[in-house]
Amino acid sequence: AALPHVHVKLSMLAYAVPGWAGDAALEAQLTGLVCETIDRFGASRCMFSTNWWAGGAMANSDGRDEISISMSQLWEKYHSWVAGKYSEEEVARLFAGTAEAFYGI
């Protein structure tokens, strides 16, 4: 986080916490990791992603378990983790603004 040119794509989260989509305690652990990352790097250097198409239609798109979740449910989870914790501007950055700036789109 000390290097200002480094950005973080928040994706493939089951590598950090396998089975999170089917267990509230594991989801809470993952939420904490995601928010800690955002706090360290700032919303202007973090962006949510899914790797949905590359990894298959699973919340845990690494294929390490049988727990599935729809893409819209996954985005709803992401939003629930940051809504109320970060400003509207920061949430907008996490879901689009950071990627737009980073990729120049």
Image (tube, rainbow, N blue to C red):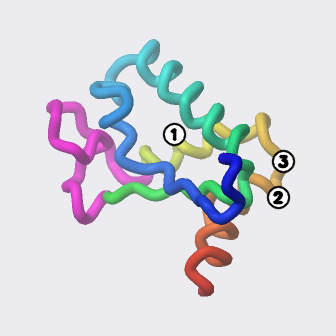
Determine the residue positioned at 67% across, 77% down: 101
Q: Which three-letter amino acid code belongs to the residue tagged 3?
A: Ser
Determine the residue positioned at 66% across, 43% down: 38
Question: Could you say where residue 18 lies in the image, as x and y percent from the top left?
Answer: 29, 27
Q: Which three-letter amino acid code belongs to the residue tagged 2?
A: Glu
In the displayed structure image, the side of residue 64 where residue 85 appears, left or right = right
Q: Quadrant of residue 34?
A: top right
Q: CA distance from mark 3 to mark 1?
A: 17 Å
- In the rendered structure, find residue 89 and report the number of the disc placed on it: 2
Query: Which element is circle 3 on?
Result: loop
Query: Which element is circle 2 on?
Result: helix
Q: CA distance from mark 2 to mark 3?
A: 5 Å
Residue 63 drawn in magenta: yes
In the displayed structure image, the side of residue 95 where residue 66 appears, left or right = left
Q: Which three-letter amino acid code belongs to the residue tagged 1?
A: Lys
- In the rendered structure, find residue 87 and report the number of the disc placed on it: 3
66 above or below 78? Answer: above
Determine the residue positioned at 55% across, 54% down: 8
23 above or below 11? Answer: above
Q: Nearer the viewer, residue 102 or 84?
A: 102
The stretch in magenta equals 52-72
Residue 101 drawn in magenta: no
Question: Could you say where residue 84 lies in the image, as x and y percent from the top left?
Answer: 78, 36
Which label's residue is closer to the chain start, 3 or 1? Answer: 1
Q: CA distance from mark 2 to mark 1?
A: 18 Å
- In the rendered structure, find residue 77 and report the number of the disc placed on it: 1
Marks 3 and 2: in contact by CB < 8 Å? yes
